[in-house]
Amino acid sequence: MPHFTKFSAVSIVFLTAACENSGANYTPVIDGPVSANYNSDLAQCQALAASGGTVDGRTAGAAATGAAVAGASSVIWNDNSNKLGEAAAVGAVAGVASDLIQKNAAREVVVRNCMRGRGYNVVG
């Protein structure tokens, strides 16, 4: 069990670092001509998307929810609590991963909307 807990903590750290600004680095598909300011506009929109934090209270809530659901499910399905800690750790990692995926998708939307606001015909 101690090895699994260390593995979970390391996984969360690497997962968070890997996803830090991947949504903010999104480059949208533009239909039509682009202005001479395209690279500057894109950099400013990506910086705007990156300005939000990656880990916040919502991330902690997602981890807690994942841990609780996985722990409870383990006890119910296995009819014992032998693997409760391991199940909770896996649930916490899944909760954090889910939250980070949602935040990266939201950052892509920020980049697309920002570029649309600057007059580009963003199609994807």
Image (cartoon, grey):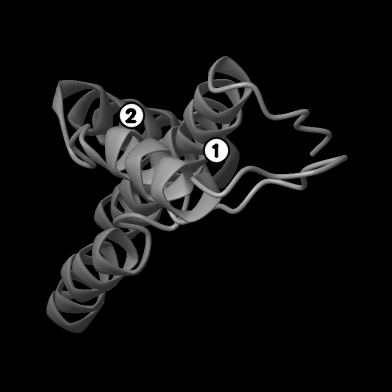
Mark carried by residue 108 = 1
| Between 74 and 66, the one nearer to me in the picture | 66
Amino acid, disc 1: Glu
User: Which residue is rendered at x = 39% and y = 56% of the image?
Assistant: 90
Q: Quadrant of residue 2?
A: bottom left
Residue 81 x %, y %: 33, 46
Give the secondary structure at mark 2. Answer: helix
For label 2, the residue is 62
Residue 91 visible to the viewer: no
Which residue in the rendered view is the most extreme toward the top?
Answer: 117
Vertical arrangement, residue 47 with respect to residue 22, above or below = above
Which residue in the rendered view is the most extreme toward the front?
Answer: 36
Vertical arrangement, residue 86 with respect to residue 67, above or below = below
Residue 8 x %, y %: 25, 68
Residue 78 x %, y %: 54, 47
Amino acid, disc 2: Ala
Mark carried by residue 33 = none
Sequence-wise, the earlier of marks 1 and 2 is 2
User: Which residue is rendered at x = 14% and y = 76% of the image?
Assistant: 6
Q: Nearer the viewer, mark 1 or mark 2?
A: 1
Placement of the C terminus among the 4 image quadrants: top right
